[in-house]
Image: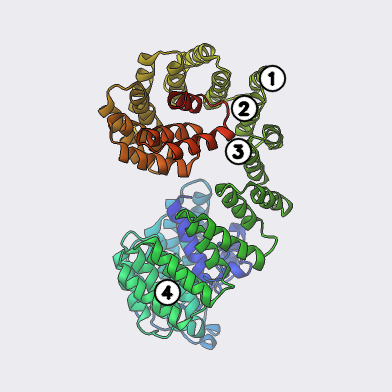
Amino acid sequence: MNSKFSLLLIILSIAAGCAQQPAKQAVAPIAAEAATVADAPVVPDADVAAAPGDAPSPDAPVVSDAPVVPDTAETGDASIPATPPPKAAASKSTLPNVELTAQTLYQFLLAEIAGQRGKPDMAVEGILDLAKSTRDARLAKRATDLALQSQQEDRALEAARLWLILDPQAARARQIITALLVESGRLDEAKIYLERLLADEEDRVGAAFLSLHQVMSHQSNMAGVLDVIQELAKPYPQIAEAHFAVAQAALLAEKDELALREITEASRLRPDWESAALLQGQILQRAGASQALDFFKNYLDAFPKALTVRLTYARLLVSEKRYTEARNQFEKLVADFPQNAEVSVALGLLSMQLRDFDKAELYLKQALTEKYHDANSVRMYLGQLHEERKQYEEAADWYNNVTPGDHGLTAQLKYAAMLSKLNRIPEALQFLHRIDARTNQQRVQVTVAEAQILRAAKEYQKAFDLLSSQLEKLPNFPDLLYEHAMAADKIGRFDTLEQDLRKLIRLKPDYAHAYNALGYTFAERGERLEEARQLIEKALKLAPDDPFIMDSLGWAQYRLGALDQALDHLRRAYAEQPDPEIAAHLGEVLWVQGKHEEAGKIWQSALKENPDNEALLNAIKKFKP
C-alpha cells in the first residue's frame, strides 16, 4: 500500500477512536456475504469500527466515533440527510423490497471473484452497481472497502456517500467521506463534516481538536488548513486545545506571530500543560534560541516537575554548547526520575564533552546497569572515553565487547587501532585480515584502517602501496581517495595528493575535508597561499564547527601575515579541541606576536599529554632550541 493510503487508514483510525479497543472485522468473508444475499432480504449492517491505528499519545487523544453528518453533500443519486434518524426509528426500518434473482447473485459473485483474481476495478464497479440498483447499504459498504483496498479514491468516495444515504447511522461511512475529502485537499467540503464532529463531541471537544493536526498536517496547502482550523475554532474561545490547534496550523503556514498569540492563549487557559509549553518554545526558537531558553527556564521555575520540558530545555542547552548548564538540568532529571537510562547516557556524553571522564564513566556504566536499549552504543562511548584518557588496554576491552550488529565493524576497526597504539602492530594487522568484509564499502573501511595503522607505525610507503592497490579496484570511493592523498603527502608525492583531492572534490563537492586538506597542504608548504585560504574557507562553510578546519584557516592566515585573524581562529579551534597540532600552531602565532610566556604554557601543557607529537616537538624546537 502506498504512503497516501497508509495515511488514509491512519486518518480513519483517528476519526473512529478505535485505537483504544479491539476492532471488529471490517469486511465479512465472501462466502458469508454470498450466503446472506442468497438467504435473506438485504438489510443495512450496524456501524462497523474502523481498523485499529497507532496508539495515541497522552496529549493527543483520539476522537471518538460520534456521528459526523454534514448539512448537505451531493452524491450521484441524492443528498445526504442533514440529521440521522432517531435510533428507535432506525431499528424499525424495513428491508429493501428487492427480489434476489439469479442475475443479482451472479453479478455479486462475479464481482467478488474479479476482486480475488486481481481485477479490483471490475470488482468495485460490479458491487457498486448492485448497491445502486438494490439500495442495499451493505453492498455500498462492501464497494467502499474494496475501493479503499485497491486505492480507488474517487470510487471510494462515491460508494461511501451512497452508503451514508442508505444507512444514515453508519458512522464509518461519514468518517471515510471526511478522510477522503481531506486527503484530496477538498478542505471546504470536509469542514462541514468536521464542524459536526466537533459539535457532537461536547465535553470531549478538546481531544477532537488535538486530533485535527494529525488529520491535516500532511496537506500541502497549509494556508488553507489554517483558514479551516481557525473557522472550526471560533465557537470555542475557552477551549485551550482549540487555540493549540490554530497555533500548530499557523506554525506550519509560517505565520509565527499568529502561532505565538494562539499558543500563549492556550497556555493561559491551561498553565501547566506541557504540550503547549513545548510548542511555545518551538515557536520562540524560530526567532532565536535565547528566547526559547528564557521561556523554558521561567516555565520550569513555575512547574519544576515538568519532565518533558526539562528534557527539551537540556537538549537545547546542549545544541547551544552550554554544556555545564545542560548537565545541571540532566542531573535534576536524575534526582526527580532516578534509574532513567536515557538520562544517564545523556549525562555521560555531556561529561565526556566537559572532559570530566570520571563522571562520564560513572553515568555510562549506570546506563548499562539500567538496561539501556542500545547497549552497544554505550560500550562504544566507554571505549572512546578510555581512548581519550589514553587507556588503550581498557578501550580495546570495551570495543572487543561490542556484539555483532550496527556497531560491529566499527568496533572491530577500533579494536585493531587500540592494538596498534599498544605497539602490537602485527597482531592488529592480523586481526584486520581476519575480518569478513562482505561489501566494497566494508573492504574500503578495513583497508583505510590498515593504512592508518601503517602510517602511525611510519610505514608510509607500505600504506601508500596498499591504498594504491585498492584504488585500482575501486577508483571512485571518497574515503579511499582521501586516505591515498594523505599517504602521498607522507612520501612527498604532492602531485598525487593534489590529483586525488581534486578528483574527490569533483565526485563529492560537499566533502569538506578534501578542500581543507588541499588548502592546508598549500599553506604548510608556503605556496599558493591565497588559493589555500579560499579552499579552507570553502571547507569551513561546509563544516562551520570543525575545529581542525578552523586550525587550518588560522594557519593559512598566519602564513599570509594576518596574525590577529589567525590568532582568533586558532584560539577558537584549541578551545573546541585541545589537539597537540593545534597547540603547536597557536603557540607559534603567540610567540611571533611576542607573547612568549603564553606560548610556552600552551606548548608545555600539550606536551604533558602528547610527549611524542612530531608537530609539537618541531614547533618548540624551532623557537626554543
| Cα–Cα span, label 3 and label 1 | 22 Å
The CA distance from mark 4 to mark 2 is 53 Å
Camera-nearest residue between 426 and 270: 426
Secondary structure category for the residue under label 2: helix
Instruction: Give the secondary structure at mark 3.
Output: helix
Q: Label 4 is placed on what type of residue? A: Phe
- Characterize the local packing of mark 1: few (<14), some (14-19) or many (20 or more) Cα atoms within 10 angstroms: few
Sequence-wise, the earlier of marks 4 and 2 is 4
Using residue 482 as the reference point, say whether residue 452 is left or right of it. Answer: right
Which residue does the numbered mark 2 point to in the structure image? 417
Residue 135 appears in the picture as rendered? no
Q: Residues within 10 Å of mark 2 (few under 14, many from 20)?
A: many
Q: Quadrant of residue 193?
A: bottom left
Which of discs 4 and 2 lies nearer the camera? The answer is 2
Secondary structure category for the residue under label 1 = helix
Residue located beneath label 1 in the image:
427
**Of callouts 1 and 4, the N-terminal one:** 4
- Please name the residue that numbered disc 4 is placed on: 244
Q: Amino acid at mark 3?
A: Glu
**Three-letter code for the amino acid on which mark 1 is drawn:** Glu
